Image (tube, grey):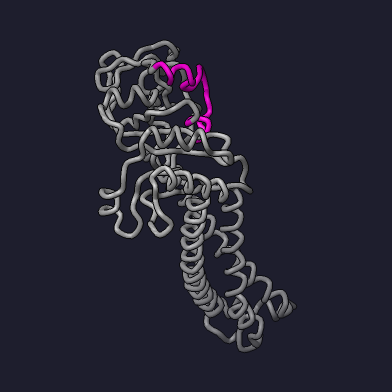
Amino acid sequence: MVRPVGSKKFLEMQKRNPEIKPVEFEFIKSKTALVKGIGMTASRQARVSYKGNSTMGVDIQGVTEDIAAINNVQVDSGHSITAEEARRNAPVAFIGNDIRNRFFEGIESIGKTIQIEGRPYEVVGVAKALGSVFGNSQDNFVMIPIASYFKTYGSNKGIRIVAKAIDQQHLMEAQDEIRVLLRSFRHLGPGQDDNFSLFASETFVSLWERLTSTIAAMAVGIVSVFMVVGGIVIMNIMLAVVTERTHEIGIRKSLGARRRDILNQYLVESSVLAGAGGLIGVAVAWLIAITVRQTTPVPMALPWSSIFIGVGLSAVVGLFFGIYPARQAARLDPIEALRAEK
């Protein structure tokens, strides 16, 4: 993606950098050889209405014909903006799933006319649902021909050029090619900095991987601390249980119970206690996930693997921290144990 943004001082450079112009898009499109799709787009939020029902904050996108395919927006019904519609500035719209659900739930949307800032647009297609990212819906949009967008808002500002390399192996080469073409069009010398920015998909992927790895590392550390604290609590509980049941242990040993029998008994009790606590925790997490999913736009789910891992780890922690109390119970002298008060 090419768009006029800054480097170190974002706001200052944003004001100083030239806006991307349609003629620059046409120049890059005609000269580039390492991309299989290139488009031009601009967007802003606006009000969309249909038969007196309106919604605010819709992402209105002025696009060329390749934008939907480049952004992996698939068609559910009808078609996306075509080259002919873009060429003749047709008053047509390709809507997201949220707009269909808002205005056309249970009825056919193709052929209907919606209003964007008071201007009529005929719906020619509906996109397949894209879902949400960080709780923000990706389906609350309307695509219209970019010439119609500029006619409605009276400005050619805010243009972005979006391109897709011919394959992953040529991504960096395609990025360098577009940079050279745009520098050449703007007559930038060898010693001059770029007055635009290029964003590759790898940039966002690497940023996402760093973010998630940091969150995962913090989560592992926090969970480890809680597991140790929980294990210590379980060990203290089992020590108290052994003290309260000393007489019982003496009776069992006098009737022939071996050390191994006593050891296994308390290890099982410790594991069951911790596993039951883990199961309760998983149940609470499951209820929270359902509540958040149904009451907010944030997508939350609890995979079955997480349930098994959570309960299993809890049982292992109980087994480990139950070893010391179990050994203490197994080492009790039966005679001394029988003398203990009930």
Q: Is residue 292 visible?
A: no
Number of numbered discs overlaid on the protein picture? 0
The residue closer to the viewer here, 339 or 239, is: 239
Going 60% across and 80% down the picture, which residue do you hit? 324
Residue 129 horizontal/vertical position (percent): 48, 30
Quadrant of the drawing holding the N terminus: top left
Going 29% across and 13% down the picture, which residue do you hit? 51
Against 197, residue 95 (above or below) is above
Question: Which quadrant of the view contains residue 156?
Answer: top left
Residue 78 horizontal/vertical position (percent): 50, 17
Going 64% across and 71% down the picture, which residue do you hit? 267
Going 55% across and 64% down the picture, which residue do you hit? 274
Describe residue 257's horizontal placement relative to residue 212 as left or right: right
Residue 264 horizontal/vertical position (percent): 68, 72
The residue closer to the viewer here, 87 or 96, is: 87
Magenta stretch: residue 73 in it? yes
Q: Is residue 162 visible?
A: yes
The residue closer to the viewer here, 262 or 123, is: 123
Residue bounds of the magenta highlight = 67-88
Against 83, residue 172 (above or below) is below
